[in-house]
Amino acid sequence: MTSSSAPFPGLPPRIALSPSRAADFQQCPLLFRFRTIDKIPTRPAEVAVRGTLVHQVLEDLFDAPQVERTLDLAKELLQPAWTKVLEQSPDSLYVVQPEAEFIPGESHSQVTATDVEVKAWAEDAIPLLEAYFEVEDPTHLQPEAREMWLSVTSEGGTPMRGIVDRLDVAPDGRIRVVDYKSGKAPNPRFQDKALFQMKFYALMLWRQRGTLPTRLQLIYLKSKSLLTADPTEEEITNFEVQVDELWSEITEAAANQNFPPKESRLCDWCDFQAICPAKGGELPAYPVI
């Protein structure tokens, strides 16, 4: 077992739990290890690039005076938004040669997205922007924050990090947390899973501000629908216990360098099958932290 100078043996220094990392561990502990500890790059997804582009446009839209926040302006913001995304996250704009086999951890022949692909992504984003204006009227909104970075520690000592898409604060102090999703709304059976992220944000804001958000709101652009929840202190207190228990499981797995694979239907879409022992692959050595 390798030694570690990090606060949590076996985990990278300054690591924290985020909604995506929590979801990874719950889905498959080995997936968490590959992404967070080994930090193995995965195949870029076009849908993710398009979603990032739409998020950037919706963030930039609120820079304009309220009366000017129109659909036409949103469309005009696509090209400058693309430039911002390229500057901020250049790695996300590489695409793997489609004819090449993708093997995690190995070098790959990569090319930048072509002008044709960029144009296609922008055109695909337009219906999502149109959908947004059917769901909300941004001329009536004045967010307190956009792309708000949160960093707190839970009552149980779990380091937590996250970025809130938008924070609305009413004159009477009520807080609404808003997150944009470029896909479709989940089946009712999976709504609790979808709201996990929002409860995570609610907990962080509560610990940071001392005020519990009144409304959690997910905007699903593909289906032009909203998923909302109004959390209670009891609910978020219980959720905090779950987060602390999850972090305890992660730190124990890291201390023992044991993140077992958890097979499910989602394995079919996993980029790490070639190195997953559950799929006949050879598990890489645990990295030296």
Image (spheres, rainbow, N blue to C red):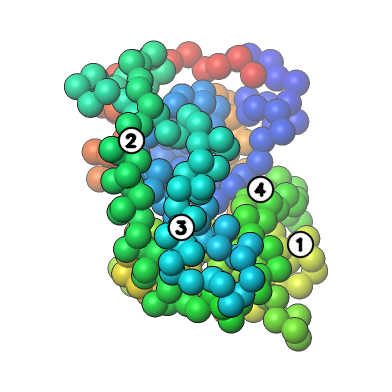
**What amino acid is found at the position of numbered circle 4 in the picture?**
Arg
Can residue 158 be seen? no
Q: Position of residue 159 (x, y in %)?
A: 71, 45
The quarter of the picture where the N terminus appears is top right
Label 3: element kind? helix
Residue 98 circle label: none
**What is the spatial separation of the Cα atoms under label 1 and label 3, in whole angstroms?**
38 Å
Q: Are marks 2 and 3 in contact (CB under 8 Å)?
A: no
User: In screen coordinates, is 99 left or right of 178?
Assistant: left
Q: Residues within 10 Å of mark 2 (few under 14, many from 20)?
A: few
| Closer to viewer: mark 1 or mark 2 | 2
Of the residues under marks 2 and 3, which one precedes in the sequence? Answer: 3
**What amino acid is found at the position of numbered circle 1 in the picture?**
Arg
| Residue corresponding to mark 4 | 161
Of the residues under marks 2 and 4, which one precedes in the sequence? Answer: 2
Q: Are marks 4 and 3 in contact (CB under 8 Å)?
A: no
| Residue corresponding to mark 2 | 115
The quarter of the picture where the C terminus appears is top right
| Residue corresponding to mark 1 | 207
Of the residues under marks 4 and 3, which one precedes in the sequence? Answer: 3
Label 2: element kind? helix
Of the residues under marks 4 and 1, which one precedes in the sequence? Answer: 4
Of the residues under marks 1 and 3, which one precedes in the sequence? Answer: 3
| Residue at the (36%, 50%) spot, across then down | 122
